[in-house]
Amino acid sequence: MATFRLQGSKVLAVDMTGDAVKAKNGSMVAYDGQMSFKKMTGGGEGLRGMVTRRLTGEQMEVMEVRGQGTCWFADRASEINLVNLHGDKLWVEASNLLCTDASLRTGTSFTGLRGGATGNGLFTTTVEGTGQAAIMSDGPAVVLRVSRDYPLSVDPGAYVAHQGNLQQSFQSGVTFRTFLGEGGGEAFQIRFEGEGLVYVQPSERNTIGGDV
């Protein structure tokens, strides 16, 4: 299995000994040794994945990198977090997924009305299995723990990813800026309940809910 390690906070180094990783297309910045690169159809999910992503609007262009040596990845100076999976599942916005072990399964998952708030459709990308994944954020990501006694509400523009046994609900009519009288248009929140982790970024992406 490939070894993931961070060099600083914005460059991912992956050491490979004949194994492979799946990475965001165009994110390779350097490599040594012998490497091969292959663009994967439908975000690495084949024809079915390609059709699903076109229908859902979830954009994900992926390449497979295989070989002996080290490959370095980065994307627009984004901050990178490593996530270890042990047979569990990670939900992540497609634009925030940088690289995964090739053995991890990627797919699309219906996430309810949350997708309507972020403007990325009603689906999000899933990563499942045992291995490592690298996710990106605009600014250093904060990892927040959710417990049954302490649910969490998140601005959809700041949401990056989540993992664990969490249930999502979509709430309209209120957001953090609404409390300050600064909101504009329709406002949204994502509420997480259960047990798990939520990754948020300090910079908000644009949403279709207006200034949220």
Image (cartoon, rainbow, N blue to C red):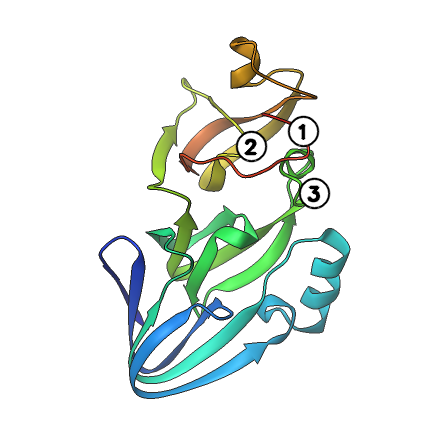
Q: Name the amino acid, label 2.
A: Pro
Whether 116 is drawn above or below 212: the answer is below
Q: Residues within 10 Å of mark 3 (few under 14, many from 20)?
A: some
Q: Position of residue 25 (x, y in %)?
A: 51, 70
Q: CA distance from mark 1 to mark 3?
A: 14 Å
First in sequence, mark 1 or 3: give its number: 3
Task: Compute the Cα span from label 1 to label 2.
Answer: 9 Å
Residue 47 in the image: state x and y as whole percent. Answer: 71, 72
In the image, what residue type sits under mark 1? Gly
Vertical placement of residue 106 versus 184, above or below: below
Contact flag, marks 1 and 2 (Cβ < 8 Å): yes
Q: Is residue 57 left or right of residue 140?
A: right
Q: Do the CB atoms of the residues marked 1 and 3 lie less than 8 Å apart?
A: no
Q: Is residue 148 found left or right of 80 in the rendered image?
A: right
Kind of residue sitting beneath label 3: Leu
Q: Which mark is residue 209?
A: 1
Closer mark to the observer between disc 1 and disc 2: 1
Mark 3 or mark 2: whose residue is earlier in sequence: 3
Q: Residue at x 49, y 57 (%)?
A: 128
Query: Tag 1: Cα neighbours inside 10 Å, few (<14), some, or many (≥20)?
Result: many
**Which element type, helix, strand or loop, lies under badge 1?**
loop
Measuring from the top left, give residue 74's x and y in whole percent. 37, 63
Q: Quadrant of residue 131?
A: bottom left
Residue bearing the label numbered 3: 122
The quadrant where residue 36 appears: bottom left
Q: Nearer the viewer, mark 3 or mark 2?
A: 2
